[in-house]
Structure formats: C-alpha cells, structure tokens
Amino acid sequence: MAAERSGGGDPVRTLALLWRTPQEPKPVGRKPKVSVDQIVTAAIAVADREGLGAMSMARVAQELTVGTMSLYTHVPGKAELIDLMADAVLQERELTPEGTWRERIKHYADRTRAVYQAHPWMRDVSMVRPPLGPGLMDGQEFVLAALADSGLEPRQVTVAHVAVEGFVHGAAASEVDDQQLAATTGESGDSWWGARQVFWDEYFDVERYPAMTALWNAGAYDTEGTLAQNMHHSWNYGLDRLLDGIEGGMR
Amino acid sequence: MAAERSGGGDPVRTLALLWRTPQEPKPVGRKPKVSVDQIVTAAIAVADREGLGAMSMARVAQELTVGTMSLYTHVPGKAELIDLMADAVLQERELTPEGTWRERIKHYADRTRAVYQAHPWMRDVSMVRPPLGPGLMDGQEFVLAALADSGLEPRQVTVAHVAVEGFVHGAAASEVDDQQLAATTGESGDSWWGARQVFWDEYFDVERYPAMTALWNAGAYDTEGTLAQNMHHSWNYGLDRLLDGIEGGMR
DNA sequence: ACCGTTTCCGTACGTCATACGGTATTGTTT
DNA sequence: AAACAATACCGTATGACGTACGGAAACGGT
C-alpha cells in the first residue's frame, strides 16, 4: 500500500503523548493492563522484526496478550502510534556536542544512520510532517547549533540544514532499504540480484549502454566488499563531499 | 500499510514485461479487453490522483470497466505492476546529453525531480532493488557517462554515482512527500503546520533549544516564499554543494 | 455444430483499521 | 455490605484489501 503515514489526528492529544505530559493518576476506575510505553515498545519490536507492514494493531495487541481494541484506550490510532515509535527511536541517538562543527555533523549522521540500521522501518516513515517530539527536536537543535558555529549566515544555516537533513535521512533510508526488504520478503539482496542474472544475459545491450560497459571493462565493479559495505562507503563519501561544498561555499 | 514494495515474483516474466518483449499474436482464443499498457496507464492515473495507497487492483479494474481478476491475466500481481509503473514514469525523462558533465548531472536531477513532481507516489517505491527496465537503465547510463567525463577514476565514478543517485532520488522524494500527503489526506502542508501552532505555544522550550531560538530571532525563518519554494531552493543548493565537493575532490 | 485455446470474472478466504456498545474491574460513598 | 461512578477491556461487525480457484464466455479453425 501507500507509504506509512503519521499523525493525522488531534494535534493536542498527539503532542501530549509525544511529550508524555504527566497526568495525575486516576483515583477511580479499573487498572490499565498496558501503558503507552509498553505499546510503543511492543510495536517497535514487531516492526524491527517483521517490518512496518506487519505492525498491525492486532499483532501488537497479541504481543502484549491484550485485546486489539484495548490499544485504542491508550493511543488514538495507528498513525499516532507510528509517530510515537519514530520519535522514540530518534531519542536513541544520544548526541554529544563535541569537536568542530564538521565533526558534530558527522556524529549526527552516524547516530542517525545507526537508528535506521536498528529500525529499518524508519524508511517508511515520512519526515516532512514529522512527529514534533523530543527525539526529532533535539536532533534539529543539534544540527542547527553545529551549522550556526560554521560561520554561515543565519539564512544560509536554514538552507544548509534542509540539505543536510535531507541527505542524512535519505541516504540512511536507502542504505537500509535492502535490509528491510530482506527481512520482510525473506530474500537477501545478493540472492535477489543473483536471480536477475538473466537480465545481463538477455537484455543488457552493450551498444545502448557504452559507459556502463566501459566501466565494467575497466574493472570499476570488481570490488571485494559486500553490497552493504559499498553503500556505506558511498554514503560517507557523499556526506564528506557535501560538507566540503558547504565549507568551500563560505569563502 | 508498510512501504510499497516492488518486484518479488518470477524475474523472467517481469523482465519480459518491463522490456515489452513482443510475443506473436495468438491466432485463436478470446480477444483481450485490456492490454498491459492500458493497465499501467490506468494505474499511474489512479496513483497520481489518489496516491499509491488508493491504487488497488480493484480500483484499477474499475477504471478500465473490467473485473478485478481480469488484470491477473496480463500482470502477475500488484508488486510487478508497481515495477512497471515506476519504469514507465522514469522513461518520461527524455535525457539529452548536452553540455559539461556538471550541466548534464543537473539536467538529470531536474528531469528526475520533474518525474517525482508529476508522480508523487514514486516516494513510496523502493529503488534498492529497482525495476531493471529501460527507464531505470537509461538514467543510470546517463549519469555514469557524465561522471566518467568528469575525470574521476573508474572506481570513483561508481562511488560518486551512488552518492548522486541517492541525493537526487532522496531529495526529490522528500520534496514531493508534502504534496503526496496533501493529496491523500486532503490537508495541505500549511494547514497541517498551522494546526500545530499549539506546539510552539505549549511545548517549545527556549532554554532547551537555544540555537533554534537564536536563528528565529535573527530572522532566519522570515522568508517570503512558500514551503515548496524553500525546499526547492535547498534542493538546488545541496546538489550544487555536492557537485562542488566532487569537483574539488579530484584535484 | 463442435473444439481447443485464451480471456474474463464471481466467489471465497484471510487480514486489515476501527466504530460501537456491552462488560469487567476499581475506589469511593452510602 | 451494597450501590455508585468512573475507567479500562474487548467481542462483534463493517467494508476494503490481494489473490487462489474454477467455471463461463468468446474467439479462430474445422
């Protein structure tokens, strides 16, 4: 189906959940069997193991040995639950502000990448209308503080911020996509490409694709590393070049 | 649901469809009411209008005034249909190899961005196990040819290729995400952010977020343009800086 | 009129999110 | 001890989804 969507409901309710606004314990009434934290934790566990597509309300309830509809007492709906999950994993980053602005950006990128590695379903969570919780906000502050220290003009900081955020989330997402597919479909990336050997045998046209052919013949694709290692290398390369460019643009 | 997934079925059948391997017309038997091309076109139309989540087999069949199960005569399943849709829209790029390698990369980025603008559901299509059809392959060739002309070593060309492709698709996807959400949820980005004014009133903490506060006070967010215009500006900025970095890294 | 071939499609199954309304459990009050 | 208001739990039902299965319909050639 379409992309996993987050947060369409009542903003006041959702924000209270994201920031865990403490509410005085109810003096009367039945005791809850589950808490919001337990639901979010269980949902993350299911998504980590089986992907966001498998993270159904029924599946999470089953994990907690609770009726499906009981979840709706604590969480408005699935969209809001995804918001809570996303902000929760973003909080795992533990960003420590040390070093030059460049080192801090790299640190941020590494920590964010680690989140995606641990929770590949983040690929499916849109970040254009993000969950305005502590996990997201702390990350934004961290990057903006680093860029502000770089010497860029305030207006330029906001422009560069969007570019850096976009690169980090985008690269982390695509790097992790393969794992997610391997987990949900049960087929590894290597196996998938192997099954498509037919393509090179039957459809690839050396005359139509001279540049690719030349690179192949030049040994550009003779790499000893795994697919994942190559992607990680390109990821670091791309971020370094982007930061080079930002640095160079200031002079 | 989870992210839109493509292409898990029989590779031979899928490749034949992607490249429209011509098959001699059947001399006998009932005449088909629909063709593969019609199905793909109708599916794209539905996804353009209502998002990939609304692009169900039943919905596409309805569009063609045909029974749902009739589609399965022509297309193995939904995943393969998405592959066909993606490759079809990538073919719309019409890449013309003119100018310096940098101009060609920019051209490629612009054309790809245009595809995402016209078909926001591309955000939900994974590109790590891509449809190996002409639309994708022609794009790859175009970028590789440009980078090969840049003077980079063959091995470096492949590394830079992944970085550029990642940036272009990632940036185009996030830029378009907002439109897609506006289309599927019926709520515009401005309206969404407006409804979350509460956040700034109730939860934003100036002491926790000094860098953001300082930037705000410095007028960094006083922009006259729309959200979409700002994103587009950052997108161009990021790509230029990335290309700056690639260029500088050669010396 | 019949036959082999190909396509069309109605039905059925299991899964999904969640609206609704009833039931179970609690602390407090009588 | 009995009654209560409040709160949480959850069974059932609805409509939509992908697609497996198998039969009906339409065609060219006899």
Image (spheres, coloured by chain):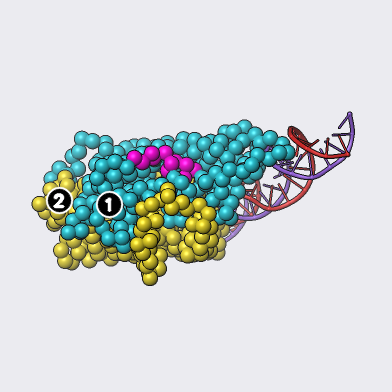
Chain colours: A cyan, B yellow, C red, D purple
Tell whether B236 sits left or right of B204: left
User: Is A40 drawn above or below residue A151 in the view shown?
Assistant: above
The chain containing the residue under callout 2 comes to: B
Q: Which residue is mark 2?
A: B249
For residue C27, which quarter of the picture? top right
Magenta stretch secondary structure, dominant: helix
Residue drawn at the location 42% of the way across and 50% of the way down: B207
Residue that label 1 marks: A149
**Residue at x 29% of width, y 44% of height:** A104
Along the line of sight, the residue nearer the viewer: B20 or D9: D9
Q: Is residue B180 above or below residue A22?
A: below
Give the residues in magenta.
A85-96
Residue A218 location in percent, x, y?
A: 13, 45
Residue lying at 39% horizontally and 56% vertically, measured from the top left: B213
Q: Which mark is residue B22?
A: none
- Foreground: B133 or A129? A129
Residue B7: x and y in percent read 40, 47
> With A145 as the anchor, is A18 left or right in this view?
right
Q: Amino acid at mark 1?
A: Asp
Callout 1: SS: loop
Chain under disc 1: A
- What is the x, y in percent for residue B58? 55, 56
Q: Residue A154's image quarter?
A: bottom left
Q: Amino acid at mark 2?
A: Gly
In this view, the mark in front (2 or 1)? 1
Depth check, front residue: A120 or A138: A138
* Residue B136 visible in the snapshot: no
Count of labels in the image: 2
